[in-house]
Amino acid sequence: MTYFIAYDITEPKRLHKVAKIIQNYGLRVQYSFFECEMEEQILDKLKVDLLAVINKKEDSLRIYPLCEDCLHKTSVMGKGTVYVPSGFQIL
């Protein structure tokens, strides 16, 4: 499933850590916004990794699931494209 992940982190050190973690799971489409394609078990690990870094009283982190049908209806105006995985490649 595809997930959109957005965040607002108040402290620069945590901000950098959160971005670095999410970059391992998806593509950055804007400064604090990522598109990630992953299975639910991977998402659960990502959540654990992020909860270890963020301050729940100061920071905001949102994960939006996007169904296949909705993904194909996504519009991009201006620069960039929607990431639609065509399959998995084992290296």
Image (spheres, rainbow, N blue to C red):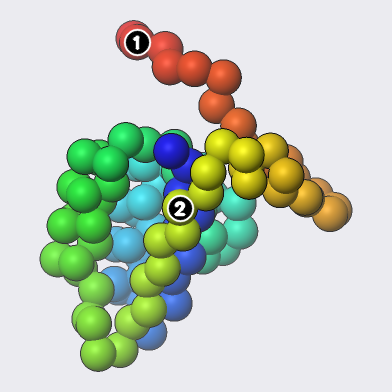
Q: Amino acid at mark 1?
A: Ile
**At x 40% / y 46%, what residue is drawn?**
23
Query: If the image is split into quadrants, where does the C terminus sit?
Result: top left
In percent of width and height, residue 24 lies at 35, 41
Q: Quadrant of residue 85?
A: top right
* Amino acid type, label 2: Pro
Would residue 13 appear left or right of 64 to someone viewing this image?
Answer: left
Read off the residue under disc 2.
65
Q: Residue at x 48, y 65 (%)?
A: 6
Badge 2, how many Cα within 10 Å: few under 14, some, many 20+? some
Horizontally, residue 77 falls left or right of residue 36, namely: right
Answer whether labels 2 and 1 touch (C-beta < 8 Å).
no
- Residue 71 is situated, as x and y percent measured from the top left of the image, at 62, 42
Towards the viewer: 18 or 62 = 62
* Nearest to the observer: residue 58 or residue 39: 39
Q: Which mark is residue 90?
A: 1
Residue 76's spot in the image, x, y percent? Answer: 78, 50
Q: Residue at x 34, y 10 (%)?
A: 90
Q: Position of residue 54 (x, y in %)?
A: 24, 73
Compare marks 2 and 1 and give the one earlier in the sequence.
Answer: 2
Quarter of the picture containing the N terminus is top left
